[in-house]
Image (cartoon, rainbow, N blue to C red):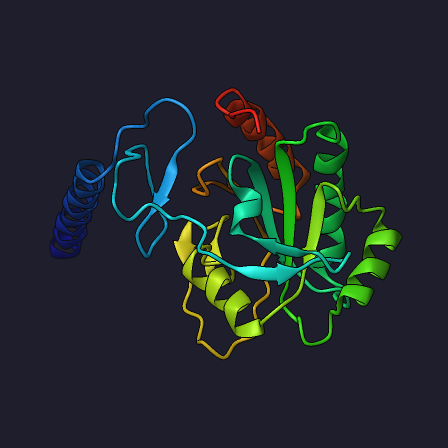
Amino acid sequence: MIFRLLFSFLFLFSCADEFEAQKNKSLASFETPGEGLPFFRGKDMEVTWKKEAKDIRKVLPFTAVDQNKSTVTLDHLKGRLAVVSFFYTSCGGICPMITGNLSKIQSRFSKDKNLVLISFSVTPEFDSPEKLKEFALRKKIHSSSWHLLTGNKEEIYHLARTVFNADNFSVKENRIKEVTGDDFLHSENVYLVDQEQRIRGVYNGRMPSSIQELAKDIETLKKDEPTI
C-alpha cells in the first residue's frame, strides 16, 4: 500500500514537471501582442504583429465574374477593406446563417465605399451569374457593395486553400485540420482583408458575436484607410 502511494506521488510530480516544461516551451515561442490587429503568416496561419514578415498571408491575383456579369479581380480590392467568404447558392446548412450575419455588415457599412464584401461560390460550375443574381435578389444583397463571384473552380479552390486555409483552419480550435485536395470546400470562416490585401482577422460566420467582433475590427482598420 505504501509503495503504491509513493508511486502515485512520484507520478503526479512527473506529470507536473512535464506540464510546466511544455508551458514554458509554449511561452518561449509566444509573440507578445502589438498594437492594432494582427497579421497571419506561414502555412499554419500563425498570428503575428510583425508586418514586415516575408510570409504574411495576402490575397493572390484572381479573376472572377459577379452576379451582374462584371469582371472582378484583385485590383478591385486595392485601397479597400474586404470581407471575404465562401458559399454556394444551393447550400441549406450554414450558408444561410452566414449570409444573414453578413447582411448585418452590409447594412452597417452601407454608405462606406471603401468596404466591399466578396463571396466566392465553391460550386462555380452550377452557380452561373444568373443564379447568383437570383440569390442576391432573394437575400437582398446590394451588388454595389457585395459581389457574389463565380469563375474557374481550380482557381477559386487554390485561392481558398493557399491564401485562406478556408476549409481546414478552425477558428474555434485555432488549429489546422487535414484536408485532401479533392475534398469539397465548405467553410464557415469569414475573413477581413486590409487595404493592402493582407488577412487581418478570421471569424466564425455562424456566430453573431464573432460578426460583431468583425464589425469592430473593420472600424479599427478604417482609421488607416486611404481615400480612393
Placement of the C terminus among the 4 image quadrants = top right
Residue 191 visible within the image: no
Report the residue at 85% width, 46% height from top: 140
Residue 110 position in % (x across, y down): 75, 31
Residue 105's place in the image compared with 63, above or below, is above
Residue that protrudes farthest toward the bottom in the picture: 182
Q: Is residue 95 left or right of residue 86?
A: right
Image coordinates for residue 97, horizontal then vertical, percent:
74, 51
Q: Residue at x 86, y 60 (%)?
A: 134
Q: In the rendered image of this protein, does residue 194 appear above or below residue 185?
A: above
Q: Position of residue 85 (x, y in %)?
A: 61, 52
Could you tell whether 199 is left or right of 45 in the image? right
Looking at this view, is 213 or 162 the one in front? 162
Rendered residue at 62%/68% (across/down): 151
Residue 77 vertical placement versus 150 (above, below): above
Viewport quadrant of the N terminus = bottom left
Relative side of 210 to 163, left or right: right
Left or right, residue 28 beside residue 37: left
Residue 107 appears anywhere in the view: yes
Count of picture labels: 0
Q: Nearer the viewer, residue 27 or 57?
A: 57
| Residue 38 against residue 164 in the figure, above or below | above
- Residue 212: image quadrant is top right
Residue 86, position as x, y percentages in the image: 62, 58
